[in-house]
Amino acid sequence: MEKQTVIETSHGRVAITDVGGAGTPLLMLHCNSGCKEMFEFQKQALAGTRRLVSVDLPGHGASSDALDPRRTYCFGGYAEAIVEVLAKIGIAKVAILGHSLGGHIALDLVARLNDVAGVMVFGTPPIPPGPEGAQLGFLPNPEMTYTGNPILTDQQVEGVVAMALGPGAERDLFYTSAVRRTDGRSRQYMVDAVLAGTQLDQRDLVQRSTVPLAIVNGADDPVINLDYIDSLNYGQLWTDRPLRLAGAGHGPHWMQHHIFNEMLQSFLGTLH
């Protein structure tokens, strides 16, 4: 049974969808300017297999804007909010699926939570802090230039949806409305925090971590440096190397959702 709930946190009100099920719960974290509904295909595929919790990050979707935007709108701030949410809904052990920004938050949660069963990320380069990380992990693509803008044009709003979900998705008014609803400061302050170097060293984290990690990227992702991701050393990578899913860009969970969901289910099946 699916429940829509709003959780009060020190960062603001956080809207979640909670679908009951047995086994280790799966937490799903969306991309920059996205919303929890962007995991609809994953919810359909995993229904009845385990508890599924999808979250609107502060400043996104049905959640409130952050009470203290500079505190919250960064990888670590979002992760702190999620820690509070999990505690309030009684989840101690959790698996995490993170898309782009959501993947960075998932990696940060590995360092903050005591019992992460496993993490799958996509569209997420594990980067060191500061400008070096941004240069290593992301491509100099025009599509990246406005992702930190507090205000987006109509064309840019459609570009965010198309990048997050795939070509054609920008015609869906729900998802373009979700991007328009996003607190523009969340984009600006998140990029500011990355460049300021105040975030966790995620490159070092994935090298040292013993938490099972799956990395599945779209082979045609236009914004992340796949070769950089492939070049890293990983402490507990699910496969021999990060996977590249053909026929998909930054949103493989949508563009190739049948194959992506098979990979996700296979990974979840290996977790304890």
Image (cartoon, rainbow, N blue to C red):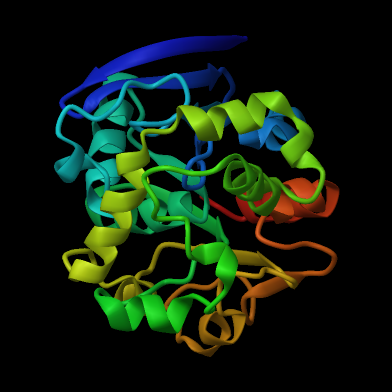
Q: Is residue 21 visible?
A: yes
Residue 3, position in %: x, y? 53, 10
Where 175 sits versus 70, above or below? above
* Residue lying at 53% horizontally and 73% vertically, measured from the top left: 237
Where 11 sits versus 17, above or below? below
In-front residue for pair 139/158 = 158
Residue 163, position in %: x, y? 66, 54
Q: Kindly give the residue lying farthest to the bottom in the view shown.
A: 231
Q: Is residue 265 visible?
A: no
In-front residue for pair 64/157 = 157
* Residue lying at 20% horizontally and 38% vertically, measured from the top left: 69
Where 226 sits versus 63, above or below? below
Q: In this image, 57 relative to 212: left or right?
A: left
Residue 11, position in %: x, y? 20, 29
Q: In this image, 269 relative to 41: left or right?
A: left
Tell me how many marks there are: 0
Which quadrant of the figure contains the N terminus?
top right
Residue 210, position in %: x, y? 38, 68
Q: Quadrant location of residue 16?
A: top left
Q: In this image, 193 relative to 21: left or right?
A: left
